[in-house]
Image (cartoon, rainbow, N blue to C red):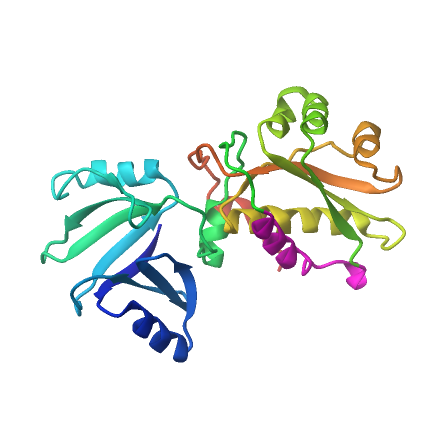
Amino acid sequence: MSGIIFFRTKDLMKIKEFYLSIGATVWLEQENCVILKHGNFLLGFCKSETCEKNGVITFFYRTKEEVDLAYRGLREIALAEPKENEKYHIYHFFANDPENRTIEFQCFLHPLQPYHDGEELLKNRRSIRYFGNREVPDEVLWRIFEVCRFSPTAKNSQSYYFVVIRDKKTLELLASLRGNSSAPLSRAPIAVAICSDPELSMSHVQDGCIAAYHFILTSWLHGLGTCWIADMDRIQVKEALGIPKEHYVATVTPVGYPAKIPEASLRRMTKEMIRFVD
């Protein structure tokens, strides 16, 4: 969950230009609304007949299901049931806090620019094995790869590379190789193989695995689900994808917008996994 403070404005363009002039950037822009970002702060303005000085505190979630869950917990103070708002492309409901401030709980009905902070990203990423029907836009994929090119490697060898798979027959072939473990590859609109070249690095295995996890985290940051499919460094994969047999395939991961996000699994306590050598 993340948050925005919203205000109504009579002059959306003038307000937008002012906040851009003091260092904010456009995080999301629609016909009747603009959300500006400054550091980790999100500030929204919506076009209206009136100018508002006291804003609405808005908490936003990834999915409708999470909004519905919030509603069930706040049903007694909610002003109405959640519903879609076509004007602003959101699914939301309102409630009041103990001092009667208006609070909004919503999810956006379209892809978003990244907004997770580092700790939230690392704690909340999930393995996704079922995907929606929405295609992955090329512009989103290229933004992910732009981040992934900064993945660290031994001696800056940059031995890793990525192979994007869109062909359905190839996805089905890859999905068949390891039974249930590789089946998610046939459920996603695309898959990505993360590979590395041993001629460029003696640590190409580590380079490939680090790059793969960079890709998985960055995909989640952009709203996309992935799942590490292990044991794909095999000749059938390399022949299907045109990868040299001596190269290493760290993983072939499905990539797509999640059909649903699973609950977090139980984790060991921190003290259970730490040992000091003094």
Q: Position of residue 63 (x, y in %)?
A: 37, 40
Quarter of the view holding residue 22 = bottom left
Q: Where's residue 69, x and y in %?
A: 28, 37
Q: Is residue 144 left or right of residue 81?
A: right
Magenta span of residues? 138-157
Camera-side residue of 144 and 166: 166
Residue drawn at 88 percent across, 37 percent down? 245
Q: Does residue 117 show up magenta in the picture?
A: no
Whether residue 39 appears in this view of the structure is no
Q: Residue furthest bottom?
A: 22
Q: Is residue 28 above or below residue 110?
A: below
Residue 3 lies in what quarter of the image? Answer: bottom left
- Secondary structure that dominates the magenta span: helix
Total of numbered circles in the picture?
Answer: 0
Tell me if 253 is positioned left or right of 83 in this view. right
Side of 220 where 210 appears, left or right: right
Q: Is residue 143 magenta?
A: yes
Q: Is residue 93 left or right of residue 173?
A: left
Figure quadrant of residue 24:
bottom left
Residue 229 position in % (x across, y down): 66, 33
Residue 212 x %, y % = 67, 46
Q: In this orientation, does residue 29 appear? A: yes
Residue 200, compared with residue 18, is above or below; it is above
